[in-house]
Image (cartoon, rainbow, N blue to C red):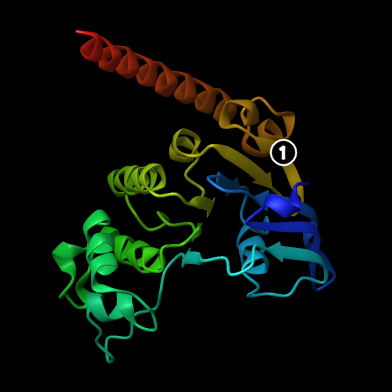
Amino acid sequence: MKIKNALISAHNLNVIRNEKAILKNIDVEINKNDFLTIIGPNGAGKTMLLKCLMEFYKPDSGKIIKKPNLRIGYMPQSINIINTMPMSVRNFITVRKKFDEISFRHVISETETDKVINKQLSVLSGGEMQRVLLARSLLNNPELLILDEPAQNLDVSGQINFYKLLQSIYSKRNLSILMVSHDLHLVMVSTKKVLCLSNHICCVGKPQQITKDPEFISMFGKDMANIMAVYQHSNNSNRHKNNQFLNGEQNN
């Protein structure tokens, strides 16, 4: 492991609850400009791994190493909104945050939350709420953005739009992304690297490699692996055609 160069890393991480191993011998690192997505079945320890990396939860053994003064933006699965304590979108995004007005305006513009900035949180749609949570996580200009099931409560259209937005933010900002997701068909297109977790690390690598791994096939089934492979091939083909078209335009 290249711990010295990592933004954040875990070495030999173990978490035990009620005599059951939630995380077992986990070694992982996030480097600059990484886009790593953690996948796995329910109860695999995905959220627990995020909590340990952010030091929300102390593991039973192992070591977490972070770059000094690392700026982390965190987007949780959801938040509980108390209707008896109304809060505007603007106040929610900025509460307990140090920011300047220029940065604030840039964030709400790139996440398209400027359209709902004066609304109450309680009236937002699911897609609007996820964008607000994303905007809040970006306000401190993070080096590492951590997302836990960010599109969990969205319909298919909402998921596609959210991952497009996330891909745009990743390509424009000089940051790294660590994400937990169940949306395999969308994740495989968006991410650079996939870590398959089932309390231990089953496999890790590029999306096109993971779908061929016996551990992935054992976990998600041969049909899912075949679907992912076809989806990945189709997406790569479309990207190639788009690149050819763009290069043709540039050469004319």
Residue 241 is situated, as x and y percent measured from the top left of the image, at: 33, 14
Residue at the far bottom in the pictured view? 84
Q: Residue at x 56, y 46 (%)?
A: 37
- Local SS, label 1: strand
- Which residue occupies the foreground of this view, 60 or 5? 5
Which quadrant is the C terminus positioned in?
top left
Give the quarter of the image for residue 91.
bottom left
Residue 173 is situated, as x and y percent measured from the top left of the image, at: 39, 49
Q: Where 216 falls versus 166 (above or below)?
A: above
From this viewpoint, is residue 180 visible? no
What residue is disc 1 on?
A: 203
Q: Residues within 10 Å of mark 1 (few under 14, many from 20)?
A: some
Instruction: Describe residue 156's horizontal placement relative to residue 225 as left or right.
Output: left
Instruction: Describe residue 231's horizontal placement relative to residue 169 as left or right.
Output: right
Residue type, numbered disc 1: Cys
Q: Residue at x 64, y 67 (%)?
A: 68
From this viewpoint, is residue 33 visible? yes
Residue 207 is situated, as x and y percent measured from the top left of the image, at: 57, 31
Give the quarter of the image for residue 243.
top left
Q: Where 112 falls versus 252 (above or below)?
A: below
